[in-house]
Amino acid sequence: MAHIEFLDETMRDGQQSLWGLRMRAGMALPVSPLIDKTGFKIIDLTGGGMLDVLTRYCQENYWEGLDLLVASMPNTPLRAGLRANANVTFGITPPALMDLWVKRLCAHGVRSFWIYDVLFGIENMTRLAKVAKEANGAQVAGAIMFALSPVHTDEFFVANAKRLADSPHIDSILLYDTAGVLEKDRIEKLVPALVKVANGKPIEFHSNNLLGLSAKAYLDAIDNGVSVIHTASRPMANGPSVPSTEIMAKNIQLRGHTHNLDESLFEPVATHFRAVGQAAGFLVDQYAEYDEFSIQHQIPGGMMGTFKAQLAMHKMMDKLPEVLDEVAAVRRDLGYPGMATPFSQLVGIQAVLNVVTGKRYGTVPDEVIQYSAGFYGQTVAPVDPNVLDKIMAAPRAKEVLANPPQSPDIPELMKQYGTEDEDELIYRAFVPQADIDKMRAAGPVRRDFPLLSSPELEQVRKLMQTVKVPVVELKSAGLNLSLRRAD
């Protein structure tokens, strides 16, 4: 029997998968101290996408909100996620700016990182790990992004895991299954091999529960040497998120394993996030049916909503099955990139364009050209030659190829963006100035959202979901509300 550590994903992957990164600091602050006291090994808290979404769509100061959350959880190492060669954008970020992003996160209290590169650019990953170590001695997990394809063999994953484990700046190996497709027969071969090359460094496991298989996969992985599993509070778990902490704490004990979690704190945390999510109109308490087709396209759960929005905009929702077929085809064409940011988005966008325009690769985004030209790193498998010819014949190809990614240093970037403040430089480099101005005009970060769980607002939410008339009015002793649908 084993002692299993839990890593909490409620405020990062849970809300990314279910709430589209729109969890404001005040939505978590009422219970973040409870999460801190629960006994998690690490709490995954933030990533580059939150800087963008919170600023642009929620008008919330990312750094201020992060500071409030960090201060509320002093007992547990807080983690940030890093894509090794880019932050926020789907393009390439200058290495000096990536290094500064890590340093600023460390300065704001982050003490743990998980670092990934879908093309396994190990040099970038270990460089950032070294930056984190030198900044504040942060713990760093090097991620093995799992994918199914003819080229993603156990040998491929194990070789890359060994390169990570051999680095003195990597503390653990994170097996990360974005599509939730790892099953027992593959786990029984892959995980022991990872344990062997890790040389005593812990193996973490993260599996998004899209197929409803991830809780069982966690148990199988534990049987084969995984000692850290990623879970979320039940309202923020399952579906495109990870398995719930509640069920995994129960499951591992039934298997005879032990953990350090205070189970009495599960319910108040869950009750809070369920109320906030329901009142805000976000997804909670999700479940997923097993869908064999998911194994072919391997689309991460958070992307499905984007697909539907894009097709609805073109009045082509009936084309969704065709788009999913095209995703699988584009992924083969492009050499089987792993379906995680940015390549899940690039494959998905290209598939939508192919279907909407009716001409495969008739319209090609700049980022697909950059990918095919090797700007992101060496592809896992070669791009199909015929497809490569079409991509390089795109109208934008010559200009894109003539402008490879640049590597300015920090003084150059400060001059370019007109600031010597490092936090402000991060903002200006990644977020449009107009959105920064709107965020600042909105005022300080709210520390709670007292109306989010009111009975009146819950009634309004239900009415707006069911009533199709253009005007909804709600009157009570303490509230008089009139809502009109936009044209």
Image (tube, rainbow, N blue to C red):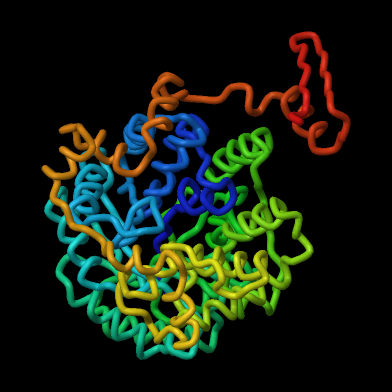
> Which image quadrant for residue 198?
bottom left
Residue 26 position in % (x across, y down): 48, 29
Residue found at x 31% / y 42%: 75
Residue 444 visible to the viewer: yes
In the displayed structure image, the side of residue 133 where residue 288 appears, left or right? right
147 horizontally vs 476: left or right: left
Residue 28 x %, y %: 49, 35
**Residue shown at the point (74%, 66%) measured from the top left:** 319
Q: Residue at x 34, y 29 (%)?
A: 64
| 407 up-or-down from 184: above or below | above
List x then y, in percent, for residue 231.
50, 58
Give the number of marks. 0
Q: Does residue 223 appear left or right of residue 377 in this picture?
A: right
Whether residue 223 is visible: no
Would residue 362 appear left or right of 71 to someone viewing this image?
right
The one nearer the camera, 440 or 268, is 440
What is the quadrant of the N terminus in the image?
A: bottom left
Camera-nearest residue between 402 and 271 = 402
Q: Is residue 178 above or below residue 101?
A: below
Q: Name the residue located 76 percent from the left edge and 59 percent from the top edge.
A: 317
Residue 478 percent across, percent down from the top left: 75, 9
Quadrant including the C terminus: top right
Query: Which of 73 and 45 lies nearest the eye of the viewer?
Result: 45
Q: Quadrant of residue 433?
A: top left
Most extreme residue toward the top is: 477
